[in-house]
Image (cartoon, coloured by chain):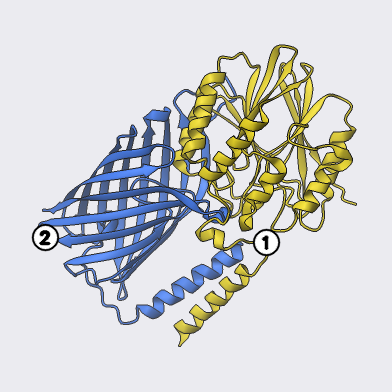
Chain colours: A blue, B yellow
Amino acid sequence: MKQRIHILILLLTTALCVSAKDYVSRDGGHLLRGFGEDRYSLSLMAEYGYNRSWEHMGNVDLYAHMPIVKNLQLDARVQYQSANVLTGAVVVRPTVDLPVGQLFIETELLYKAVMRDRMSDMCAAISLGWRFDYVSVQIGGFGRVMDSWSRDWHSEDKYQTEPFNLLYRLEVFARPQVNRWNISLALSNIDDWQMERMWQPLFMLNSRYDINDHWRLHLEAETKITGMFHLNATFYAANVRTGFSYRF
Amino acid sequence: MKTRNILCATLLALVCVACNPNYDMIGMINGTSPKIAERFQDSRRYSDSAGVVHLQMPPDYRLYVCTDSHIDTTHYGLEKFIHAYKADTHPHMALHLGDLINAQGHYAHADSILRLDGVMKNRKDTIFMTCGNHDIYFNQWHVWQQLYGSSTYWFDTRNGSKLLELYICLDTSEGTLGTDQLKWLRQLLEEKKTAGYRRIIVFTHTHLFKQDNSQGHTSNLSLEETYELTSLLSEAGVEMYLCGHDHSREVTAYGGVKYIVVDACCDAEPDPYYMVAEMGEKVNYEFISLLPRP
């Protein structure tokens, strides 16, 4: 299995190099996860979500994107889900401009207070990415600590650790980044609010439209299919979100 | 040209994997058996008509657990487990935690091993089954159901009128409990948590945590379901959650619940085991090696 993964990664990297040979870096800002944007921005999104465990919910997402200096960005995000779950994340992202595309390193801390279940889930991730006009690819790892707030300290109870999970994200864009609008398809096991186990992929369809120099409109959809690697795939969750960004 | 070659090679590799008769590759896009909502309804219909099983047991009895036998052409591990179980003169019962067979067309073989010496004529005897992901590949849910009836049910052990253990079987062969089954579980635990059982034990196929990479490409339940289920089991005072799927042993405690992943007993496994637990006032369990093979 490991050998197959290595071959797959090699094939993917080779394909990207081939497709990127005519690329000239143009910094228009990627839609997702804020990067590439060279101005401070705030985003507010409203979201409808459904999953088979918590069923219907409404969520509010708040994003802050802070390009502190050239080639160093800081993102902060907070989400409240009406299922009584609060999530916060901080991302530090140094970037390196290359003759072909841009390299970035993401370090992320994600904390989820699952108040309805009286527990917390904290993840720390580091990943390396490479983005082009039409493609962005990111790979890395993350660890998780899951803890119950009702832990009996006088028993053998312990927090749950998942020391290493593979993190991946592949996103394909319909338009160059400088375009006023864009649509993308993404396959990943992480999004802005969760880090799923590596065999639990998320599928995303994202779009944006720059209304003017300051305002940007977002419309995004995401689905989680469970059991794909059980070879018994079935629908588990879906989210639709929309909102605005204001770029200062 | 180079890109085209790479794409062709990737496509060829996918076709080769898809042709492996053990893998239901269509299921990677959409499971070929009925979905969990339908399987749950099938199971409940069967269980409602069959009635609830109350096993009379002494206060100390043995629980045999095996999982992931993946029967295809050989059956050494499962047969050895059944023989050990049958030879035990102490009162006992057994659980099989799913993945009885490996692919399609092996139910007759696997079932003939389970029924050695007439050990199990129907689910009301002493091996209780749940289904795993392999069991429902290639639209085989109806075969499984015809043989074993229900994948979502409960039964208990009693000593006279004294309640001993409540056992709850869940169907997680699709990587999710689904909405209806989760509601059923919530309601059942609510009703039973104050009934006076000595302990509550939940058994199913899929594990909840991913502590290491031993599980290879097998997936867990989703995160939200992990949060919800662990919390529910803790609140209801469930003592043990028994599962397989990972093929490698993992014992951990979280929120007052002991989570045990039992090793696979399949013949392809280099180090197969089954588990035996002494069910008394306390639970003492051990893992028994299925080596050497004949």
Badge 1: how crowded within 10 Å, few (<14), some, or many (20+)?
Answer: some
Q: In the image, is residue A12 above or below residue A94? A: below
Q: Is residue B111 left or right of residue A230?
A: right
Is residue A198 at all visible to an observer of this figure?
A: no
Asked whether disc 2 touches disc 1, contact meaning CB atoms under 8 Å apart, the reply is: no
Name which residue type carries label 1: Asn
**Left-right relation of B272 to B294:** left
Q: Position of residue B74 (x, y in %)?
A: 82, 55
Identify the mark at residue A211; answer none if there is no mark: 2
- Direction from residue B193 to residue A45 in the image, left or right: left
Rendered image: mark on residue A156: none
Mark 1 lies on residue? B22
Amino acid type, mark 2: Ile
Q: Image quadrant of residue A129?
A: bottom left
Tell me where residue B216 appears, x and y as whole percent. 61, 54
* Chain letter of the residue carrying label 1: B
The quarter of the picture where residue B199 lies is top right
Residue B203, how many percent across, how many down? Answer: 64, 34
Residue depicted at 36% across the width and 61% down the height? A186
Locate the N terminus of chain B and report the quarter of the image it occupies: bottom left
Find the distance from the CA under tag 2 to the CA under tag 1. 52 Å
Q: Does B233 sit above or below residue B136?
A: above
**A86 sits to left or right of B258:** left
Residue B238, x across and y down, in percent = 58, 24
Residue beneath the point at 51% across and 21% down: B190
